[in-house]
């Protein structure tokens, strides 16, 4: 039987490797998604997800995450949650509730505490250095404070044809307290229906929300488009619409799979990377480029892979 797991960005590789092992041995898509995203959340050098995520303008790490079960369409989500180790697990637990499935801030923290989730200070020394440097640059050079939005988003199909999706992010670096983007919003940052397929997005949440990109991709797959056609069409249309109406489009990148395990990817930026594994493909990192609304991708070279990790783990100094 076939299975697939796909995720945004190279940072998902180690998680996808573990998720793939579960799927290969007939584990379910929900467990694969949770396990894989937890691994990304736990790795301190990824500065846009979980532990080590960059803080808001007040120096606080506020995290967003969501989980969706493609069989029941159950959704759980948290936004602006502080001081809990694995927001994806809290989101998954919320997806089992009948009501009160999307909690923000203090409400999400109360729920996590009551349900025994592990508390943790998510602000690392490395993130503090980046925060202080950025504050200085913002003042010295007049830079915009907003940058960095590499959400991890995943979709999986298991051998029982069940699908699930999840997201986790610290959102925009230097965001306003309480700001949330697309990642916790159903239809924007993620959507999955086991009878059709699933999609997840990364990029500038404020713009992705304008196109409900993940739902749009699933809707297009339902209409008969292949995952690749659906992804290119949804990203291309939103990009063009934003340029027409607002003169500018933020970063938008998506990955998706249909319920046969075929995948698609689209982006309006250079250098978007993603990871995919199937029953026929060992976990592989690809790097994308986009020309005239069509996305192409190549296996990441070993040089690219080395540079990626070197850049993320390079020592940081206060400026
Ligand atoms: N895509 C993540 C965010 O905008 O928060």
Image: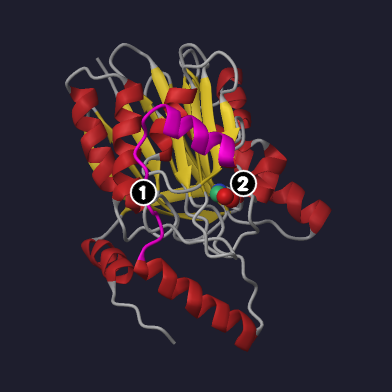
Q: Nearer the viewer, residue 43 or 11?
A: 43
The relative height of residue 158 versus residue 202 in the rendered view (above or below) is above
Query: Percent x, y for residue 202?
Result: 52, 47
Check residue 147 in the rendering and tell me which mark sits there, or answer none. Answer: none
Q: Position of residue 218 (x, y in %)?
A: 56, 25
Screen quadrant of the N terminus = top left
Question: Image point 33% across, 52% down: which residue?
Answer: 11
Q: Earlier in the sequence, mark 2 or mark 1?
A: 1
- Mark 2 to mark 1: distance in Å? 23 Å
Q: Which residue is mark 2?
A: 181
Tell me the quarter of the picture where residue 159 sits: top left
> Within the magenta stretch, is there residue 114?
yes
Colour basis: secondary structure
Ligand 1 under 8 Å from disc 2 Cβ = yes
Q: Quadrant of the C terminus?
A: bottom left
Start-end of magenta stretch: 106-124
Residue drawn 46% across the image and 38% down it: 167
Image-quadrant location for residue 162? top left
């Amino acid at each position: 039987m076939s299975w697939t797991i796909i995720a945004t960005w190279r940072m998902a590789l180690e998680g996808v490797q573990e998720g793939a092992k579960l799927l290969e041995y007939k584990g379910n898509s929900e467990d694969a998604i949770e396990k894989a995203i937890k691994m990304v959340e736990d790795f301190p050098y990824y500065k846009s997800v979980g532990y080590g995520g960059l803080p808001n303008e007040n120096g606080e790490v506020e995290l967003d995450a969501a989980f969706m079960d493609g069989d029941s369409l159950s959704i759980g989500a948290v936004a602006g949650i502080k001081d809990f180790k694995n927001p994806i697990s809290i989101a998954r637990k919320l997806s089992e509730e009948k009501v009160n499935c999307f909690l923000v801030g203090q409400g999400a923290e109360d729920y996590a505490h009551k349900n025994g989730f592990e508390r943790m200070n998510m602000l690392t020394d490395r993130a503090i250095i980046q925060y202080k440097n950025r504050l200085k640059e913002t003042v010295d050079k007049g830079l915009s404070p907003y940058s960095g939005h590499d959400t991890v988003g995943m979709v999986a199909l298991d051998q029982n044809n069940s699908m699930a999706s999840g997201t986790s992010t610290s959102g925009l670096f230097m965001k306003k307290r309480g700001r949330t983007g697309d990642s916790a919003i159903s239809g924007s940052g993620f959507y999955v229906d086991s009878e059709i397929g699933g999609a997840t997005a990364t990029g500038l949440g404020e713009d992705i929300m304008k196109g409900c990109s993940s739902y749009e991709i699933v809707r297009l797959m339902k209409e008969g488009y292949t995952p690749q056609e659906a992804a290119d069409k949804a990203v291309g249309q939103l990009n063009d619409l934003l340029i027409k109406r607002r003169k500018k489009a933020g970063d938008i990148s998506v990955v998706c799979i249909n319920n046969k395990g075929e995948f698609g990817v689209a982006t309006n930026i250079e250098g978007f990377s993603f990871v995919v594994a199937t029953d026929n493909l060992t976990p592989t990192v690809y790097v994308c480029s986009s020309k005239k609304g069509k996305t192409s991708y190549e296996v990441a070279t070993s040089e690219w892979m080395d540079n990626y990790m070197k850049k993320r783990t390079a020592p940081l100094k206060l400026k």
